[in-house]
Amino acid sequence: MSGNFLTIPGEQMRRSRSSSLTDLISAFDTKAQSHTELQKITAFSGHFDKNQKPTFSKEEYGKPKPGSMTEYRGAEAQARVCTEMKELCEIINEYGKPPCKGLLPPELKSATKVISFGELFTIYTVISDKLVGILLRTRKHQLTYFEGEVLFQKRDDDVPVFLMQPMEDIRHYCDNKALQARRSVSPMPN
């Protein structure tokens, strides 16, 4: 046999290990350098450099980095809130009564169910302690309506809470909002 066909397996293996180890070390050094640079512009780190100011566009300001775990957790939280909004509306739909349309002002004619805040509070606290926050969110999305800025237990027990859309529309709306929130981020955050 000729020497051209003869290969030394150990030598080839050492070269391959050496190059893969070099690649790993290089990747680690790059990651460490980018982390050091990030710490210089992060105000809460111990290595903050006051001379280096981060620059943000209006769209980036106050938002997490795309692909980060923070962005992912925010989207998941938004999806959970949409689910809780739907659950609250389900409870109003189940325990509420049809409103007397003749006595309602024109802006509430589309209301499908009504329940007093006191009754809703009694039912919902068994499920969640975030009733007032979720109620505010459902009003913002025009799923419910009630008078006043915030409702308080005991003081506002007699305030009616109206469900403003048919339950099927609310389910569809909330499910789509939750899906949009989850799709807005990459599936594998950094």
Image (cartoon, rainbow, N blue to C red):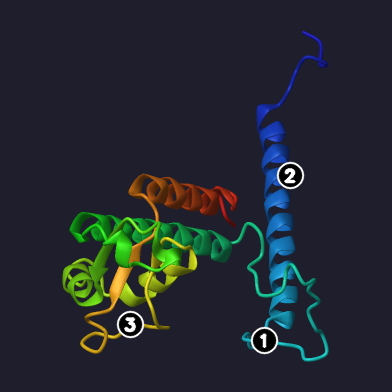
Q: Amino acid at mark 2?
A: Ser
- Position of 53 compared to 96: left or right? right
Q: Which residue is mark 3?
A: 151
Q: Quadrant of the C terminus?
A: bottom right
First reached walking from the N terminus: tag 3 or tag 2: 2
Vertical position of residue 132 compared to residue 175: above or below: below
For the point 43% across and 68% down, the residue is: 139
Asked if the residue under mark 2 is in contact with the one under mark 1, i.e. CB atoms within 8 Å, the reply is no
Number of labels in the image equals 3
Element at label 3: loop
Disc 3 crowd, CA 10 A, few/some/many (<14, 14-19, 20+): some
Q: Which marked residue is nearer to the observer: mark 3 or mark 1? A: 3
- The residue lying at 18 percent from left, 59 percent from top is 95
Kind of residue sitting beneath label 1: Ala
Q: Alpha-carbon distance for marks 1 and 2?
A: 38 Å
- Distance of label 3 from label 1 (alpha carbons): 38 Å
Query: Is residue 130 at least partly visible in the picture?
Result: no
**Nearer to us in this view, 88 or 13:** 88
Q: Which mark is residue 19?
A: 2
Residue 43: tell me if it is visible: yes
Which labelled disc corresponds to residue 158?
Answer: none
Q: Quadrant of residue 106?
A: bottom left
Residue 104 x %, y %: 35, 67
Q: Decide which of 37, 180 is in the foreground and name it.
A: 180
Q: Is residue 88 left or right of residue 20?
A: left
At which x and y percent is residue 34? 73, 68
Location of residue 49 with respect to 68 vertically, above or below: below
Q: Amino acid at mark 3?
A: Leu
Q: Which residue is mark 1?
A: 43
Closer to the eye: label 3 or 2: 3
